[in-house]
Amino acid sequence: MAGKIKSLSIRIDEEMLNKLHVVADYEGRSANSEILILIRDAIEKYEEKNGKIEI
């Protein structure tokens, strides 16, 4: 998935953010890296069910 790196700003409540940091720390990743992995996994799951997303 080559391409330009874009920035995305999200709003997240403090408790969820704190929990994200716990999970990321446990996995040895930054919160940003953990979010990217979660997004990638969600896209893969979607494509398994619905077919490849063509951009």
Image: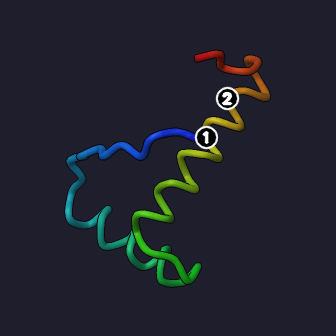
Mark 2 closeness class: few <14, some 14–19, many ≥20 residues within 10 Å? few
Tag of residue 6: none
Q: How far across and down, in percent of the image, does residue 36 sit?
A: 51, 54
* Quadrant of the drawing holding the N terminus: top right
Q: Marks 2 and 1, Cα distance to the nearest angstrom?
A: 6 Å
Going 70% across and 37% down the picture, which residue do you hit? 44
Q: Residue 54: image x %, image y %?
A: 65, 16
Left or right of residue 55: residue 5: left
Q: Nearer the viewer, residue 27 or 33?
A: 33
Q: Residue at x 21, y 56 (%)?
A: 13
| Circle 2 residue | 46
Disc 1 marks a residue whose amino acid type is: Ala
Q: Nearer the viewer, residue 30 or 46?
A: 30
The residue singled out by tag 1 in the image is 42
Query: Is 19 placed left or right of 15 in the picture?
Result: right
Residue at point 51% right, 77% down? 29
How many labels were placed on the picture? Answer: 2
Mark 2 belongs to which amino acid?
Answer: Tyr
Q: Quadrant of the C terminus?
A: top right
22 sits left or right of 18 in the view: right
**x%, y% of residue 16?**
32, 62
Q: Secondary structure at mark 2?
A: helix
In the image, 54 versus 26, the foreground residue is: 54
Whether tag 2 and tag 1 are in contact, CB under 8 A, the answer is: yes
